Image: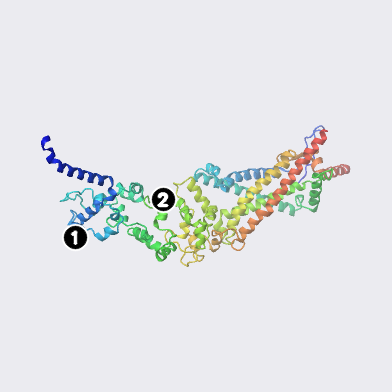
Amino acid sequence: MTMRNLHRQAPWFALAGVIILLVSALAVFPVNAKPPTQETEKYCLSCHGDSNLSMTLPSGEKLSLYVSQDQLDHSVHSNKGIECEACHNDISTYPHPRLKYETKRELSLNYYQTCEKCHSANYEKTQDSMHAQSAAEGNQDAPVCTDCHGHHDTLTPDEPRSQISVTCSKCHTDIVDAYKQSVHGAALLEDENPDVPVCTDCHGVHNIQDSRTEEFRVQSPELCAKCHADKELMDKYDLSSDVYSIYKRSWHGVDISVYKARWGAVWHDSAVCTDCHGVHDMLKTDDPKSRVNPANLLETCRQCHPDAGPNWVDAWTGHNEVSLERTPFLFYVDKFYTSFTPFILWACILYVALQIIRSIVDRVRSTL
Amino acid sequence: MSVNKTNPRASAQQEKTFARFNLGQRWEHAVLILSTLALLLTGLPQKYRDMSWSQDLLSTPERLDLVRQIHHIAAIILAMEAIYHIGRAIYLLARRKMSAAMFPTMQDVYDAWHMLQYLLFLRKEKPAFGKYNFEQKVTYWFLFFGFALMGISGFIIWFPVQFTKFLPGGVVPASKMAHSTESVVAAIFIVVWHLYHVHLERLNLSIFTGRLSEKEMREFHSKEYDRLTSSQSSSDKKN
């Protein structure tokens, strides 16, 4: 191109300038731009919206390739503009590269790793969990992110709260069945009670630990205390919030506190809350099926004290402060040591003090 | 108790001494001191198990078991000593071979009142005491009932299942509280009352040597001194 011809090219330069301006405007103000991502979703669904679309994996399993628009619309991701490619980052061309997975499970175990890109903190936590440990031991079925959260249909996990127990019940069916019968589970499922614990309140969310260990056992009373020592919360249900502090002073509680403080790795059988109240199936004390109902208490004590006779249950002060009606023996011993004995001891101390004064005075006088 | 009036080896120059405790009683006291000390040393760390000093001492579950075993062995020794002591006292009292000098009398109340007046500078002289003054009786009976309580409550919390076969269950937590509290009460009492009277007020080693000097007898047990010397002089007259 020569300078002579330049004036003939001018309109084209102007057009290029306008385009560059527009593009840079888009780059500077991306918010104003319509997210291209939704376009991707639409684009992908032009094929994957077909409910009959499927393929057969080398394992012989039939893999549905259908993605429901409805599921995506309800998921937490799609509405935030997080597109198919965010997770399916190995597919950017059509025709797609050949799928390299043998089984459906293998596919899940590979795809869930893309969650880390955005959810790194929670992803890290899961790596320390009981589930990750189980996976490391070769359990293919140990849950990964998508097993609990879903994949295309990822929803807010605790809306409603009862959904959490549904999620866990996919694998822990028996335990959730027991939980549903419990005072906590029933209140959750029947009334959507916001105060009762769901699975994750006791077991943790992503770094779920083995609850059968020595450490978990000696720490478990504190889990219960999170709610049961909360006066405001317990008053709401007319329950005592002193149960934990009284337990801590009991033979069982002191024993457990020592193991917790010093010997966390040593198994110890002194009773923790769940030994008497049940692990997942705890009931109200006045429920005839409750392990701690007065009618069933002896049997419960006999789990650890097999030779105990019927009088034995009264040896348990039942998380109650000392009172004449409930624990008369304890009441009188307590009275004896809070009134009579201090009186005697102070009388002795006073008497000895007088003796010391008198002997000093006598000695001083004798030297005068 | 037989009373040895004079030390047979005592020469005219040597001070006359009076027998106070026989060999058996001195051994009983030695067993009492040692077993009580062992019980306190092994018991207090158990009482204060939620304290870090106790957890430092009882550093492993095995050591806790060991300390409990020592506590139980010392408890059996002390219980046997108590049974021997009471059995012997009943036997000798029944056969009128032992004076009932240790039992409290109205005289002790008068003595205590008199002594209180002396301590408050309302009287010039201390009261005259017999073989056991009221302070010593207080020591004996306070610890007598204290040890009885410790023994009963201790065995109940050692064998709670067996005891609740025939006792109400409420005795178990009551025993635990009594055992735990009485131990400290008895320890305070021994330190304040007993150790003051036998070490600080005067060094009284008669429970180890078995004897009191004539000076001590005159000063602290003048009635007993008068009784012994007058009976001796009267028996001298007879001879």
* Secondary structure found at label 1: loop
Q: Does residue B3 show up?
A: yes
The residue that appears at 50% across and 47% down in the rendered structure is A258
Whichever of labels 2 and 1 marks the residue nearer the N terminus, that label is 1
Q: From this viewpoint, is residue B88 visible? A: no
Chain to which the residue tagged by mark 1 belongs: A
Q: In the image shown, does A317 or A176 lie closer to the viewer?
A: A176
Q: Nearer the viewer, residue A164 or B229?
A: A164
Q: Residue at x 51, y 65 (%)?
A: A294
Chain letter belonging to callout 2 = A
Q: Which mark is residue A29?
A: none
- Which residue position is annotated with label 1? A50
Image location (x, y in percent) of residue A43: 20, 54
Number of callouts: 2
Q: Is residue B92 left or right of residue A171?
A: right
The amino acid type of the residue labelled 2 equals: Thr
Q: Secondary structure at mark 2?
A: loop
- Mark linked to residue A213: 2
